[in-house]
């Protein structure tokens, strides 16, 4: 994969993130979380720089970045879609929604973004609001009692919104 | 057993003067479920409407933690009178204010009604969902504003800590905990007092207190709710543990998926610090205790103690062999006491009201042996195919039938109950014939499931048990850390076998192989994740072997779930020809004339189920 954002990684956000955690390597997971939040993924350059600055082997940074589900190495879409596949959502059809939304958006594997980088689709293991099952979050907003059709409607609206602005 | 005033649901404010001189007090639920259904929008609308009528000095509007009635949100309780409103939207607000506030009569159509319709407006304690519950851990739910520390203090908050510090030695606190028979609510059921004692006696300093809020079981959200509706109870429990064990530092390891709970906890810690209830020299007794928060990054295995601590040290969360205990060599290799959120929240009432009171609730006898019974209550998240989905707290020993049918209100849409799944991915399914089983740690283990952290997922006749087993195994494949072979490779092979069964490509031999392999993984894995991973397979095989056999012998999925074994069709008697299915079919596989029965072209159909979702007449059938 071509490395985007290389210059951006060297500007302040990463330094700010490291300073926030006092450049203490025991907070590496917290730092990676902030990196993920800021860049919507863990850019390789950011991982390299964390490794150098905190004196942690690069393989450990990647071990962590690939071990925990909260991190991705490729960028998520502008509006990440997370389909809950917790047990309550599963029995109410959550897994089917995931499959359908991925197919309709042309996303082949979880975590991948659409070609226009507007959306990415992934499953999440229980958002802890099982009374609303099945649940989908789009760009962090919770949609309960949802379905494939309802989710695709939200996607259409966001796409229109993005095109007009 | 008779409920004492302290733990009867919603006893609190009836008849009491409403604080602040207000005439009416409205509490909207701010839990994740209700917020997702728009409770904050209702609150804003209410505030506007109340202000418009010039009643701001008469009507107080506040937010409360989760009331547990999550399926019916947004929920609002209005006092005086404990009137429960449900399913509110901002459009109801003008009429609600008109009726309830101005006319003094509840807005009937949004009041929780009792089935069968009695025509009267019920009190909380009369509603089946609430009536059979017994609230110890959730004693403050919906009553206090979780963000206001004074609310907690008014309800005996931090009095247990003060009692412990001023009248009890650490050993006495531990003794009280042992006598209470409290067992770990995270799933293991290890006696809490014994764990504290071992940690206190372990050599090494400093010692640490850790609260496990990495609630990873899918279908369970007790810990999130406890933190969101009563964060100080958890902090108080941790501080008491710190005093008993001799630790000055506590950590809460919380899932990153729970932003609301984290914010709530951050505020609670800051407030407690400001009041001197955390920090140095608490209650002038020379006891120092600090709490900070660690965010998890999404790994189910981090619920395991050594993996959780590895993660807190900034490493990948991989468990280590169990013979080194974290109570002796835990965080930074120091003695560390790890308990779950709900366990800590149980501690203050035990200290305040005594072990004897606590042992009066629950099953068995713990006077000689702390493993001799299950005392107190347990919070369950009752979800899935049940009318009243939500969070319930029940005394140990209540039957599953009471939980599912009396509290949960039974199965919706006239479907038949099939099973209830407890214990998350480590647990199992419990079939209808065991519905009268009293729920406690040992009974659930005996029937091949487990208490777990408290997820309780109800399933009906349209849920395929092979698919459920496959679901949990696939979940665990994704969460296995990969360190030991039986779990890493064994689960993948189990999944292959289950897929073969679901795809109709298996024979009798597959089931035997599945059973053998499951037992091997169970025996040989390094940690509890792998050791309990085959439970969903073994328990579904134990109770629903006929379903496996139908897949294998007849190539048929009795519940109509497994895609390879089902076909979709439209019942011409029910179809009205509304064309909704045809318009939504992604494959254009449905055809038919307007207002005439439609049909599905089987060769084009990909069995996505969208037509069944959108059909308003239940005309799409699955064979």
Image: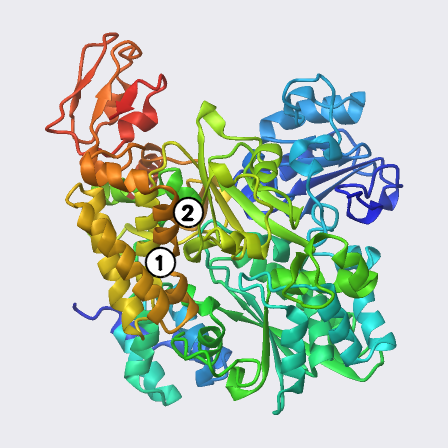
Q: Quadrant of the C terminus of chain A?
A: top left
Q: Which residue extends farthest bottom?
A: B204
- Where residue B278 appears, x then y in whole percent? 73, 74
As drawn, is B425 to the left or to the right of B404?
A: left
Mark number displayed over residue B217: none
> Which residue does the numbered mark 1 point to in the structure image?
B534
Which residue is at 22% across, 60% downward? B493
Please state which of residues A142 and B479 is positioned toward the viewer in this rendering.
Answer: B479
Decide: marks 2, 1 in contact (CB < 8 A)? no
Secondary structure under the numbered disc 2 in the rendered image = helix
Horizontal side of A82 relative to A73 (left or right) equals right
Image position, residue A92 (x, y; %): 39, 37
Question: Which quadrant of the view contains residue B479?
Answer: bottom left
Q: Nearer the viewer, mark 2 or mark 1?
A: 1
Label 1 Cα neighbours within 10 Å, binned few <14 / some 14-19 / many ≥20: many
- Residue corresponding to mark 2: A87
- Extreme residue toward the left, this view: B603
Q: Position of residue B38 (x, y in %)?
A: 55, 38
Q: Are marks 2 and 1 on the same chain?
A: no
- Residue neighbourhood size for the residue with mark 2, other residues' Cα within 10 Å, grouped as few (<14), some (14–19), many (≥20): many
The quadrant in which the N terminus of chain A is found is: bottom left
Q: CA distance from mark 2 to mark 1?
A: 16 Å
Report if residue B281 is visible in the image: no
Q: Considering only vertical position in the picture, is B585 above or below B373?
A: above
Callout 1 secondary element: loop
């Amino acid at each position: 994969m071509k490395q985007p954002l290389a210059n951006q990684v060297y500007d302040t956000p990463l330094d700010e993130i490291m300073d926030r955690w006092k450049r203490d390597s025991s907070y590496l997971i917290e730092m990676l979380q902030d990196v993920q939040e800021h860049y919507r993924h863990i850019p390789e350059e950011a991982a390299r720089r964390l490794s150098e600055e905190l004196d942690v082997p690069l393989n450990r940074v990647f071990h962590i970045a690939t071990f925990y589900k909260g991190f991705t190495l490729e960028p998520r879409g502008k509006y990440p879609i997370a389909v809950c596949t917790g047990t309550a959502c599963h029995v109410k059809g959550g897994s089917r929604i995931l499959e359908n939304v991925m197919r309709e958006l042309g996303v082949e594997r979880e975590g991948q973004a659409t070609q226009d980088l507007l959306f990415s689709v992934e499953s999440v293991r229980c958002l802890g609001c099982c009374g609303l099952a099945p649940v989908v979050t789009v760009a962090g907003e919770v949609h309960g009692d949802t379905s494939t059709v309802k989710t695709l409607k939200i996607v259409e609206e966001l796409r229109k919104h993005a095109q007009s602005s | 057993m008779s409920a004492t005033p302290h733990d009867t649901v919603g006893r609190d404010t009836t008849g009491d003067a409403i604080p602040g001189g207000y005439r009416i007090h409205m509490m909207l639920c701010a839990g994740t479920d209700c917020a997702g259904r728009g409770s904050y929008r209702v609150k804003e609308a209410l505030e506007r409407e109340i202000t418009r009528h010039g009643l701001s000095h008469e009507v107080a509007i506040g937010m409360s933690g989760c009331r547990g009635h999550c399926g019916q949100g947004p929920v609002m309780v209005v006092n005086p009178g404990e009137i429960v409103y449900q399913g509110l939207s901002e459009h109801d607000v003008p009429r609600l204010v008109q009726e309830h506030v101005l006319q003094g009569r509840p807005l009937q159509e949004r009041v929780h009604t009792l089935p069968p319709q009695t025509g009267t407006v019920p009190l909380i304690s009369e509603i089946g969902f609430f009536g059979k519950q017994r609230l110890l851990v959730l004693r403050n739910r919906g009553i206090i504003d979780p963000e206001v520390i004074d609310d907690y203090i008014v309800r005996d908050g931090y009095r247990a800590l003060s009692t412990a510090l001023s009248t009890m030695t650490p050993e006495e606190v531990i003794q009280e905990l042992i006598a209470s028979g409290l067992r770990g609510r995270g799933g293991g059921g290890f006696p809490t007092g014994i764990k504290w004692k071992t940690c206190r006696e372990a050599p090494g300093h400093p010692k640490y207190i850790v609260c496990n809020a990495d609630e990873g079981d899918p279908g369970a959200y007790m810990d999130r709710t406890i933190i969101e509706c009563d964060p100080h109870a958890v902090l108080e429990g941790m501080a008491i543990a710190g005093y008993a064990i001799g630790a000055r530092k506590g950590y809460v390891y919380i899932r990153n998926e729970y932003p609301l709970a984290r914010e709530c906890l951050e505020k609670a810690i800051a407030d407690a610090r400001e009041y001197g209830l955390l920090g140095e020299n608490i209650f002038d007794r020379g006891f120092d205790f600090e709490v900070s928060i660690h965010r998890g990054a999404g790994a189910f295995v981090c619920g395991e103690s050594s993996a959780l601590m590895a993660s807190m040290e900034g490493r990948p969360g991989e468990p280590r062999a169990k013979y080194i205990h974290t109570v002796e060599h835990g965080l930074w290799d120091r003695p560390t006491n790890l308990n779950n959120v709900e366990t800590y929240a149980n501690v203050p009432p035990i200290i305040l009201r005594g072990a004897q009171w606590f042992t009066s609730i629950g099953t068995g006898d713990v006077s000689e042996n702390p493993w001799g019974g299950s005392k107190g209550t347990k919070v369950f998240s009752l979800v899935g195919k049940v009318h009243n989905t939500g969070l319930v707290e029940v005394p140990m020993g209540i039957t599953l039938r009471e939980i599912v049918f009396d509290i949960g209100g039974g199965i919706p849409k006239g479907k038949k109950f099939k099973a209830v799944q407890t214990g998350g991915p480590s647990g199992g399914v419990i079939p209808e014939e065991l519905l009268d089983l009293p729920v406690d740690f040992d009974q659930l283990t005996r029937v091949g499931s487990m208490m777990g952290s408290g997820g309780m997922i109800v399933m009906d006749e349209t849920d395929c048990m092979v698919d459920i087993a496959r679901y949990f195994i696939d979940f665990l494949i994704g969460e296995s850390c990969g360190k030991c072979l039986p779990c890493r490779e064994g689960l993948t092979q189990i999944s292959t076998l289950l897929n073969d069964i679901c795809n109709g490509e298996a024979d009798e031999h597959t089931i035997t192989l599945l059973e053998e392999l499951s037992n091997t993984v169970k025996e040989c894995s390094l940690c509890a994740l792998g050791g309990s991973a085959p439970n969903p397979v073994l328990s579904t095989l134990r109770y629903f072997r006929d379903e496996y056999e139908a897949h294998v012998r007849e190539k048929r999925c009795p519940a109509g779930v497994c895609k390879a074994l089902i076909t979709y069709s439209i019942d011409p008697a029910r179809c009205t020809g509304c064309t909704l299915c045809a318009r939504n079919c992604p494959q254009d596989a449905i055809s038919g004339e307007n207002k005439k029965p439609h049909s599905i072209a089987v060769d084009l159909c990909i069995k996505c189920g969208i037509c069944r979702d959108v059909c308003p007449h239940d005309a799409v059938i699955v064979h």
